[in-house]
Amino acid sequence: MDLITCNAARESMERALAAGTSPQGLRATQSLSRGSMKLYFYAPRGKDLQTPHDQDEVYVVLKGSGSFKQIGDEAVPESRSFGPGDAIFVPAGREHRFENFSDDFETWVIMYGASGGES
């Protein structure tokens, strides 16, 4: 069994930031992986600078609040409020962003499945 705590994930992220090895310079760290599944801890500050991903993903919000925007096929982007305990699904390749989030915002990010997403 693999187990990662939030404190261990925070410490790992801070070490990666200090060493310049965090993914794309984001306040994130990969915590676990198994097969196609990857678990990240993500705690952006100020702006969410991530880009669309090749895999489907689920965010599970640990701390903080704000709004989450997905830009899909519709003409108007969909934006929803989020808070601790909320789970958000994003299909592979979809542009998305956390906005107006609190300074304590932290989330688990679970990426899984084949490149291009599952059907």
Image (cartoon, rainbow, N blue to C red):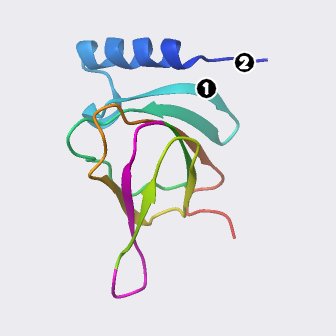
Q: Residue at x 53, y 20 (%)?
A: 6
Disc 2: which residue: 2
User: 28 above or below 9?
Assistant: below
**Farthest residue, direction left:** 46
Task: Classify mark 2: residues with Cα within 10 Å, few (<14), some (14-19) or many (20+).
Answer: few
Disc 1: which residue: 32
Q: Secondary structure at mark 1?
A: strand
Which of the 4 image quadrants contains residue 35?
A: top right
Which of the 4 image quadrants contains residue 14?
A: top left
What x and y, as percent, mark residue 7?
A: 50, 13
**Amino acid type, residue under disc 1 in the picture:** Leu
Is 73 contained in the magenta span?
yes
Discs 2, 1 touching: Cβ within 8 Å: yes
User: Start and end of the magenta stretch?
Assistant: 63-76
Number of marks? 2
Marking on residue 57: none
Relative to 47, is 84 on the left or the right?
A: right
**Amino acid type, residue under disc 2 in the picture:** Asp
Task: Classify mark 1: residues with Cα within 10 Å, few (<14), some (14-19) or many (20+).
Answer: some
Query: Disc 2 to disc 1, how far (Cα)?
Result: 8 Å
Which of the 4 image quadrants contains residue 33?
A: top right
User: 49 above or below 116?
Assistant: above
